[in-house]
Image: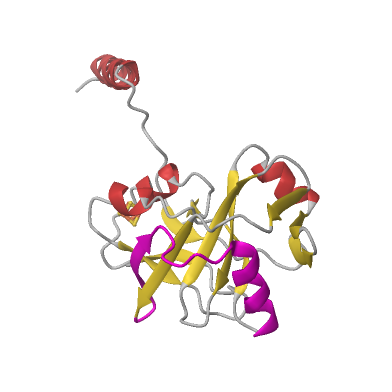
Amino acid sequence: MDSKNFTLFIVLVIVMVAVVTLNLQGHGIVIGEQGRPIIREPFTAEDYSISIEADGIRVSLSDEVLEEYKGNYLSVHAYDSDDAYFAIFKRITGKEIEITVDEIPSFQVTFKENKVANIDKPERADTFYQILKDAINQSRDYGLGRCLLGRQCIQSCPVNAIKLIRDDTKEGKGRIIPEIEYTKCILDGKCANVCPTHLTVLDKTK
Ligand code: SF4
């Protein structure tokens, strides 16, 4: 192929790629970014604090967490004496999340060998206030997390490489996170592109 034909060939390829991309976007399909999915570190004591008051729970957020999540949702969780996880989801509107004494948890999660087994509406009638208060008094895990249990990451994965698990590191405070089987992962980035709270993000260096 001489240089004139080669230039024509390159121009043709660029035009074809542009046409295909515009066509897909016209059908509402966005081509997502690709990369190695990683799970973000848990929130730390610098990101938030939780206090129990007479009229409810206050979760105070740092400026950075507020800036990232304003208008979005985060999860506050606590474990009961049967090792079940209870979560309440709250929309972030300011520096404080308020949970009143009579609010019930949004979801109850049970585990089998550290993997999420069931996600249900709470079976017990306890308020989230009571569950969290007991967790604090009895030194069980509780905290602020990003997973909203929507399982979009699992549903988006074409190779079934994701499970939800309990993060039982000291820093994780029992938060729920996706566990990615990297031997199966094809690095298409779909899980990170659908995660509404950016718990899963892409490492572009890999
Ligand atoms: S293959 Fe599955 S785990 Fe890997 S990036 Fe894609 S969606 Fe995520």
Viewer-proximal residue, 96 or 178?
A: 96
Q: Is residue 120 left or right of residue 176?
A: left
Quadrant position of residue 110: bottom left
Q: Is residue 61 left or right of residue 183?
A: right
30 is within the stretch colored magenta: no
- Specify start and end residues of the magenta stretch as a single range: 113-138
Measuring 73% from the left and 46% from the top, which residue is drawn there? Answer: 66
- Say if 3 sits above or below 69 in the image: above
Residue 30, given in percent of the width and then of the height, sits at: 37, 29
Q: Is residue 62 left or right of residue 30?
A: right
Viewer-proximal residue, 103 or 172?
A: 103
- Say if 84 sits above or below 72 in the image: below
Farthest bottom residue? Answer: 138
Q: Quick check: which quadrant has ligand 1?
A: bottom left
Viewer-proximal residue, 140 or 144?
A: 140
- Say if 9 sits above or below 135 in the image: above
Viewer-proximal residue, 63 or 80?
A: 80
Residue 206, given in percent of the width and then of the height, sits at: 44, 57
Q: Is residue 34 left or right of residue 81?
A: left
Colour convention: secondary structure
